[in-house]
Amino acid sequence: MKRTFLTAALVAVVGIMGLSAGDASAQDAKAIYAKECAKCHGDSGAGDGAMGQKLKDKPSDWTKGAGLSGLDDAKLAESIAKGGGAIGKSKAMPAYPKLSDAEVKALVAHVKSLKK
């Protein structure tokens, strides 16, 4: 009886807080962006990262919305998970298949938030 009550209480708390094992926060997205994306897209998303400057196809400047036009959230998510070539963009954009769906979704929101 105690175990059932504790389980039900935990489920209720998690439900109230809107948490699940698959949730990724804006903070998570910022950390992923800083670690994986900023080297090419730059810290602020201006497309001025050190590695990106060496590429033939320059990274998108998210601050001006470049690279966002014509792309919905699903296409942005696909480009993150499968790489730029998967959606007809630069093949220099690597795939990040190890990111969870929640992390990709949070990263899409973060990239969109960089537009000034």
Image: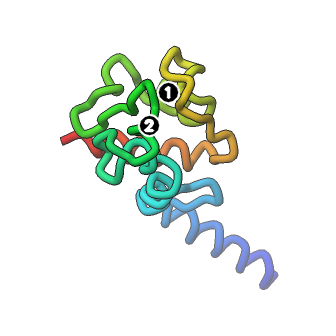
Q: Earlier in the sequence, mark 2 or mark 1?
A: 2
Q: Which residue is mark 1?
A: 74
Q: Nearer the viewer, residue 35 or 98?
A: 35
Q: Which residue is at 46% across, 32% downward?
A: 55
Q: What is the spatial separation of the Cα atoms under label 2 and label 1, in whole angstroms?
A: 28 Å
Q: Position of residue 42 (x, y in %)?
A: 36, 48
Q: Is residue 22 above or below residue 74?
A: below
Is 9 located above or below residue 36 in the figure? below
Relative to residue 93, is residue 44 drawn left or right?
left
Q: Foreground mark, 2 or 1?
A: 2
- Residue 108, image x, y percentages: 44, 40
Of the residues shown, which amino acid type is indicated by label 2?
A: Lys
Q: Which quadrant is the C terminus positioned in?
A: top left
Q: Which residue is mark 2?
A: 54
Q: Residue at x 64, y 67 (%)?
A: 11
Give, as a three-letter code, the residue at label 1.
Answer: Ala
